[in-house]
Amino acid sequence: MSEEVPRLERLRSVRQWLVWQLRRTDESIAELERQEAAAARTARTMPPPEPEWKLSMLRAGGKPSPDAVHTSDCRMAGEPTKQLTREQALRALAEDGITACPYCRPDTDLGVL
């Protein structure tokens, strides 16, 4: 059957198919570029995530010292406080011997009991 269709016509069909594939590929690339640009815009305009834990500080003798670890929304922390990452909060509770707030129980959220 392929002998019945002239070689030139077959090559033109292949070329037409390749043009179609190239157009689809270009459309896919353009769509991905639009998505990445939108994600970059969103990342630039969104505020950084708020830390989930904080450390309340006591002012004893003029120098603040660590008091207790709290969840970020705990109202018992008072001022001043220091924002903590998850790793810092775990270290404060497990290694530094700082107590967990008995009201918000950050040790439960962190898996430290």
Image (cartoon, rainbow, N blue to C red):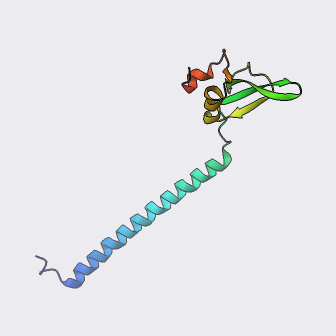
Please state which of residues 51 and 5 is positioned toward the viewer in this rendering. 51
In x, y percent, where is residue 62?
Answer: 89, 28
x and y percentages locating residue 23 in the rendered image: 41, 68
Quadrant of residue 46 within the rendered picture: top right
Residue 96 vs 10, above or below: the answer is: above
Q: Decide if residue 69 is on the left or right side of residue 57.
A: left
Name the quarter where the C terminus is drawn.
top right
Across and down, in percent, residue 99 comes to 67, 21
Q: Where is residue 36 drawn, in percent x and y?
A: 54, 55
**Residue drawn at 62 percent across, 48 percent down:** 42
**Residue 66: quadrant of the picture:** top right
**Relative vertical location of residue 79 with respect to residue 88 in this rendering, above or below:** above
Residue in the image at 61% along x and 30% along y: 90
Please state, as top left, top right, bottom left or bottom right, where the N terminus lies in the image.
Answer: bottom left
Whether residue 5 sits left or right of residue 108 in the image: it is: left
The answer to which of 15 and 89 lies nearer the viewer is 89
Where 103 sits versus 46, above or below?
A: above
Q: Is residue 73 visible?
A: no
Q: Is residue 83 visible?
A: yes
- Left or right of 83 in this view: 62: right
In the figure, 97 relative to 11: above or below?
above
In percent of the image, x 57 and y 21: which residue is there? 108
Q: Number of numbered discs present?
A: 0
Q: Residue furthest top?
A: 102
